[in-house]
Every structure is written in structure tokens, then in C-alpha cells.
Image (cartoon, helix red, strand yellow):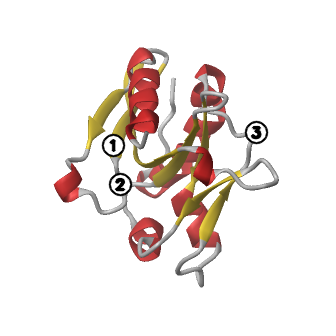
Amino acid sequence: MADDGVNEARTFFMHNRCKFQEVDLRNDIGKDVYVDVATNGVVSYLCVALQIKSGRSYRTAGGNYFIPVANHSESWRLSTIPVFGIVYDPDDTLMRWVDITGYLRTHPRQDGGNIPVARDTVLNVASLAGEFTDALVPYVGRFGTIALN
């Protein structure tokens, strides 16, 4: 089901004390959810928009995953709030993530196709506190340096 990924993400982020705000389908323009990320159990200044995909159809023959770009390349690339992608695989019930905005900024000519999501970029408690949050921090750098602790 298409909602399985959103439901899994909602449960995960809420259990980790993050604020999870779904976008009404009538207003969905490639950003399904906004999450205010918590660090050390407290909601931080970090906010991310999520594009969430769910199902086996987003898994490649090689065992990795992908997020289709469709007509979202410019809005994801230029977004003032970083857009990350999550792919939920119902077979192993894991979520994988990718920094869509960062990927598209390093691939400025990409207007369609897919964004690769590595099978080992699993979203879990450790990666939320580590790599996922670390990937968000550079987006606030232009406003000054802010410590997470």
C-alpha cells in the first residue's frame, strides 16, 4: 500500500520525539511530509521535507532503491527547506533515505530519471541521531553556525 511508507515514517519520527506534519494530498507538490527533527529528545531548529515512496517497485534488480524525479527536479533542487527521500520496503520493513536536494544540486543537469538510494542507508535511531541529522546541518550554515547540543 502507498500509505505504508508514510505510516512507518510517522511512527518512527513521532517515537523519536520529532514533529511530523503531513501535507494534504490537494497540496502535495513532491513534498509529502515536513519533519522538525529532535536532537537529544528536544525538537531542534532542523526541518526537512520528505518525499516518501513505498513498495517493491522502488527496489532495483541490484537490491538498491530509487526515488523517481518526475517533474520535481527544480523544486527539490532549489527548495529553501531540504528535501530528503524515504523508500519503505515492505519485505524487510526498513526505510532507506537520501538527501534529494543535495543530490540534485550536485547533478544540476538532471531534470528527470531517478535518484539512487543505497540499500545500506537505513533510517533507524542511530542514523537519525547521526548521518541523517548531520546531512541536515549544512543547510542552516548560511544563517550562521549553530551547535546541536
Crowdedness of circle 2 by 10 Å Cα count: few (<14), some, many (20+)? many
Label 3 environment density (alpha carbons within 10 Å; few <14, some 14–19, many ≥20): few
The reply to whether discs 1 and 2 touch (Cβ–Cβ < 8 Å) is: yes
Q: In the rendered image, which residue does mark 2 sit on?
A: 31
Q: Which residue is mark 1?
A: 34
Res. 104 in view: yes
Q: Residue furthest right?
A: 62
Near mark 1 (Cα within 10 A), the count class, few <14, some 14-19 or many ≥20, is some
Mark 3 highlights which residue? 120
For label 1, the SS is strand
User: What is the three-letter code of the residue carrying label 1?
Assistant: Tyr
In the depicted structure, whether residue 6 falls above or below residue 71: above
**Cα distance in 3D space between marks 3 and 1:** 23 Å
Tally the numbered discs. 3
The answer to which image quadrant residue 56 occupies is top right
Task: Find residue 2 and report its horizontal and vertical position in percent.
Answer: 41, 43
Image quarter of residue 124: top right
- Residue type indicated by callout 2: Lys
Q: Nearer the viewer, mark 1 or mark 2?
A: 2
Q: Is residue 13 above or below residue 36?
A: above
Q: Position of residue 126 (x, y in %)?
A: 65, 22
